[in-house]
Amino acid sequence: GENVEQHPSTLSVQEGDSAVIKCTYSDSASNYFPWYKQELGKRPQLIIDIRSNVGEKKDQRIAVTLNKTAKHFSLHITETQPEDSAVYFCAASRWDSNYQLIWGAGTKLIIKP
Amino acid sequence: EAQVTQNPRYLITVTGKKLTVTCSQNMNHEYMSWYRQDPGLGLRQIYYSMNVEVTDKGDVPEGYKVSRKEKRNFPLILESPSPNQTSLYFCASSLASTSHYEQYFGPGTRLTVT
């Protein structure tokens, strides 16, 4: 079955710098890759997603890239701000598995002032 | 307001005492799911439901039961809770089970079993 590995488990960056979180997946048939953000004590919320027919998607300061050949996708956050501090989860799913999301273990992003 | 609600938000109980965590959504979503979140393990799916009267096991279903008698409700039942079920539980729903849609999470239920 599908397996999603997420790295690093903790990432500390200076405010204003960029942050990159990477996920690798095992099932080449996976075709949907969302990213969720969970602030401390809050629920996870979708921040961006990408489907396998595109290689990159941007939304203001966040972007996701997908490399289907290498089976990895990454979240890029530019000009980081204190409110970006949170745990970020990646996930993957395929259309013929009841759209079940297989989740990465999460990355704790710390923005240093 | 579109939302997913869970009750209770916090629960401390003893081993073996049956409990139910309720989950309700007001968005007419077909798909509902239960996850548990433990440090370092991310989100692990317990059970999911693709529609009324249709439920299926996720990755960690042992010790849990669910039912989906109405579209809006998806309760999680622990018949005989044990300390290893101490965790943070999230209910989630999404629009359809036939495509990829955003999952909306409830606020979470922190369960402690002593």
Image: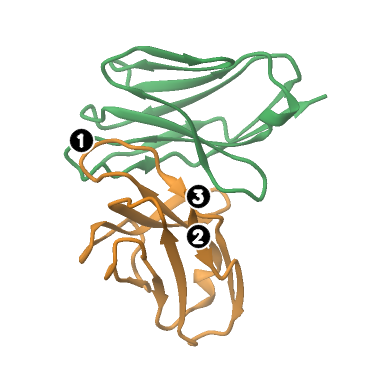
Chain colours: A green, B orange
Tell me: A69 left or right of B2.
Answer: left
Distance between mark 3 and mark 2 Cα atoms: 24 Å
Q: Which residue is mark 2?
A: B5
Tell me: B113 left or right of B51.
Answer: right
The amino acid marked with disc number 3 is: Leu
Q: Nearer the viewer, residue A38 or B69?
A: B69
Front of the two marks 3 and 1: 1
Instruction: Give the number of the disc on residue A39.
Output: none
Farthest-out residue, left: A96
Q: What residue is at 35 percent from the left and 42 percent from the top?
A: A102
> Are the residues at dot 3 and dot 1 in contact (C-beta closer than 8 Å)?
no
Helix, strand, or loop for circle 2? Answer: strand
Distance between mark 3 and mark 1 Cα atoms: 25 Å
Q: Nearer the viewer, residue A72 or A49?
A: A49
In the displayed structure, would residue A108 be above or below residue B17? above
Q: What residue is at 64 percent from the left and 15 percent from the top?
A: A18
| Residue B30 percent across, percent down from the top left | 27, 52
> Are the residues at dot 3 and dot 2 in contact (C-beta closer than 8 Å)?
no
Q: What residue is at 45 percent from the left and 70 percent from the top?
A: B22
Distance between mark 2 and mark 1 Cα atoms: 28 Å
Q: Which residue is mark 3?
A: B41
Q: Earlier in the sequence, mark 3 or mark 2?
A: 2
Tell me which chain the residue with mark 3 is part of.
B
Farthest-out residue, right: A113
The amino acid marked with disc number 2 is: Thr
Instruction: Give the number of the disc on residue A95.
Output: 1
Tell me which chain the residue with mark 1 is part of.
A
| Residue A20 percent across, percent down from the top left | 56, 20
